[in-house]
Amino acid sequence: MAISFGGLATGLDTNALVGAIMEAERLPLTRMEADKVWLNNRLSAFQEFDGKLNGFLDNIQNLGDREQYFSRKLSTSSQDFLSATASNDALVDTSYQVEVQSLAQVQKSYSNAVDGAGNDIGFSSKTDPILGTGTLIISVDGVDHSIDVTSENNSLEGLMTAINAADIGISASIINDGTSSPYRLTFTGQTVGSAFTVDSSALTGGTESFSNFQVSQPATQAHIVVDGLDIYSDSNTITEAIPGVTLDLLNAEIGTTTSISISKDDSAIARNLRSFIDGYNDVVSFVTAQSTFGDGDGGVLGGDSGLNSIKRHLQDMLTSYTDNNGSFSALSQLGLETQKDGTITLNTDTLDAAIAQDIDSVVSLLAGEEGGTGGLATSFNNYLESLTDSTNGLLAGRTESITSNISRIDDRIEQSELRLAKREETLRSKFNAMELLVSVMNAESDFLTQQLASISSLNRD
């Protein structure tokens, strides 16, 4: 007796038959799913390529900055007494000797009280009314200012507030020196070189009084000597002692000099060109890898006309001549050399020779002429910005096209799934109907067989 897995009447494995038929009919659906994977891989590859284009754009941001190409290199014999920076206006191949004799500082003074033995001490409280009343005279640069001390403000805090509110060119604060009478009123000048004195003799009464105001730091201007010339400043940052150089004074020591040397800094040209080469090679190598066949299968973007067009355009820009008033008109004259694989390298000997010959022309080629149109940096920058534009760039266009195709495939897959579900339902209904028919026929066959057997038995009898 035959073993039946799906058909009780026929003995056929109807589940396997239906599965085989549906597998054959799902082949177009499988191909559509594969198309979706391919499209998504292309989208990922375009996103990677867009990242390389943006990286190239970032790499050349400094290429068109003229100012950096004329920067100065400054060195000092010591960092103990000053730090120095040079602008492009600094004279090259020069040196200076700088002696810092004093730093700019404001006057600072503090108050003393007097005890019964005549010793200078602090005040016992900053909030109690211990000062008496009258007038405190503060003279700033020879101009007297009167501070009224009344019963409402005759504490250290009250007097401090009154002085600060008067806005006379000094500021007041209170410190605690940690002794048994710890509080002292301190004054700080607001202007370098401005001297002040304090006269408390007109204050009367009170339990504690001022004995004097001690100067803890005198007001002085900064004083430096540059190559034997005395220079004074109200600030410790001096900008005009050496042309194009800013000096930040740190410490003073009479008799000790710091040597400053200034020279040209040509490193920006080589640095920016190497950055340009890195970005260019990254883009070109990606396109080449996508289009390479032979031992490998190439990339998912192989044959894309957009990528190949970009590569050709970059190569044309690299080798094109640029009109300018300088002696250089092509990047090859600065040492950029093309390799067999399309990438480029930098011949530093050629670049150094070009800089030594005419640095102004090198800068004009890269960054454009002063007051004129931009150089090669502007051309590359504009082209890369158009490629990476979020609305009209390469990725934006390819993304719109690919996502549209994926959406259409998704719609077809959805429709196919519905059709296949209906198809499977129909097949199973047909097989079920066949099983029912065969079952009826088998029953009729059994009945006829039984009838024939009965007739044959009657005949024998």
Image (spheres, rainbow, N blue to C red):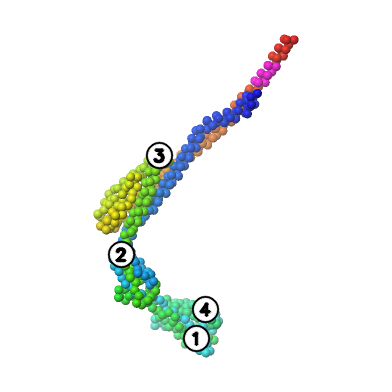
Label for residue 176? 4
Residue 295 occupies quadrant: top left
1 vs 3, front mark: 3
Label for residue 120? 1
Disc 1 or 4, which lies upstream in sequence?
Answer: 1
At label 1, the amino acid type is Asp
Q: What residue is pinned by disc 2?
A: 263
Left or right placement of residue 388 versus residue 10 in this view: left
Above or below for 54 versus 169: above
Give the crowd class for mark 3: few <14, some 14-19, many >=20 residues within 10 Å: few
The kind of secondary structure element at disc 2 is strand
2 vs 3, front mark: 3
Image label count: 4
The kind of secondary structure element at disc 4 is strand
The kind of secondary structure element at disc 3 is loop
Q: What residue is pinned by disc 3?
A: 295
Q: Residues at badges 3 and 4 in contact (C-beta under 8 Å)?
A: no
Give the crowd class for mark 2: few <14, some 14-19, many >=20 residues within 10 Å: some
Q: Quadrant of the C terminus?
A: top right
Q: Which residues are magenta?
A: 441-450
Q: Residues at badges 1 and 2 in contact (C-beta under 8 Å)?
A: no
At label 4, the amino acid type is Asn
Residue at 42%, 49% in the rendered image: 51
Q: Quadrant of the N terminus?
A: top right
